[in-house]
Amino acid sequence: MIRSQRRRHLVMWLVLGPLALVVLVASVVVRTGGTP
Amino acid sequence: MSIEYRAISWSRPKRVYDAIVAVGVVLFLGAYIGVTSVTHTGDEAISPPILLMRATGACAFVLLHIILCIGPLARLDVRFLPVLFNRRHLGVLTFLVALLHALAAIGFYHGFSFVNPLLSLLTMNTDVGSLRGFPFEWLGLGALAIMFLLAATSHDFWNKNLGARAWKSLHMLAYPAYALLVGHVALGALQDERGPIATIAAFCGLLLVGGLHVAAGVRETKRDSGQSLDAGGEWIDVGSPMDIPVDRARTVCAPGGERIAVFRSGDAISAVTNVCAHQGGPLGEGAIIDGCVTCPWHGWQYRAEDGCSPPPFQEKIATYEVRINGGRVQVRTRANAPGTRVEPARIEGGRTPNTHEGDA
């Protein structure tokens, strides 16, 4: 990859990685457990 | 490489790859349905349509994890390169499995109304202010739309017409698709889970994908740092000629951040950009095969001395001036126009000379 793509790749991960983790944690916090 | 359009240039490795993946998907679906049928009985029994929906959803999610792990794994260990070769086939299959999941879900939950199923999906729940009741289906639909776009443009036809740079940027949308799917799973399927296994698996998947990318990034950052420039800032030190393995390359990083692959073939040393014209593959991790620099990702080839693909192919990549100075290989930081011929630096008698002729 060229430099700008590597940078975009990094920024994407820095934003999306923690965001996905936060959503995952939040989903566990609010979970009640439903019927299968 | 191909000079004419073909839907797929089938080869034995591709057939084997696709067969292994197809068998893997069937086994996964069978195992998921089998195990869930055994563990969920009586009041907890799951109806076949929902079981199919869950199995295909889980399968697509796992496949996307595998796809996202292949890139960093191949950068960390060359033994994973064969898996990367047909990654696009895996991507298309992932979309098809995800589509099956979407059709099963929409058909089961929205197919029995007089309202258009897709419209029903988009309008049935609009509670975006609640995390617990969030319309997670929207996230899945968004991810599916991205996966469709990526699958539809996965062919080299689109790569060639969009250009390698735009194509690669487009296919980086796989990461937003993954983030959407994490949200889709977390706010959807995991909300109905009573046990911790699925949640733990989702966490492990995210940490695995993220961890591998961080590990590959750290390794490349270390490799890129510490480049030694000459006093004029025009030449980068690559090392002793013998430090470059025969028919392989050492990669250095120019001050602007672009990487340069310095190859040694016999007593000749040449430098080209590290970026393949096809999909931006790391040429410096490839080898010289049949006298040409060969990309480790898909085998695209270029002559080291002028960056041109051998006839009848017409691709060109940038070249760099190389010299041997004081027994050290040096490469000029400024790139030549793609296809510019550069006389290779020669190792005298296969041994490291002390000076380059310009300094004598």
Image: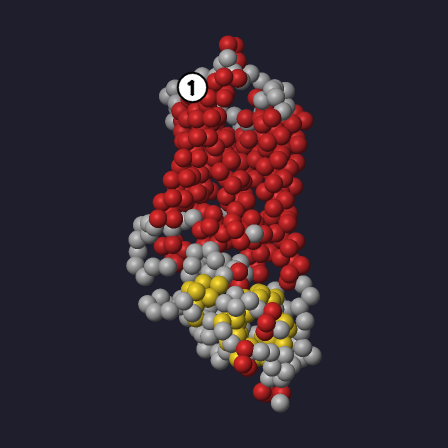
Residue B254, image x, y percentages: 61, 69
Give the camera-side residue of B241 and B208.
B241
Residue drawn at x 62%, y 87% as measured from the top left: B359
Residue B268, image x, y percentages: 50, 76
Q: Residue extending furthest bottom?
A: B360
Report if residue B211 is visible in the image: yes
Residue B344, image x, y percentages: 50, 78
The tally of labels here is: 1
Residue drawn at x 38%, y 51% as measured from the top left: B155
Residue drawn at x 43%, y 48% as measured from the top left: B86
Quarter of the image where the N terminus of chain B is located:
bottom left
Kindly identify which residue carries mark 1: B48
Q: Is residue B149 left or right of residue B321?
A: left
The answer to which image quadrant residue B159 occupies is bottom left
Query: Could you tell me the amino acid type at mark 1?
Result: Pro
Color scheme of the displayed model = secondary structure
Q: Secondary structure at mark 1?
A: helix
Subunit ID for the residue under disc 1: B
Report if residue B258 is visible in the image: no
Quarter of the image where the C terminus of chain B is located:
bottom right
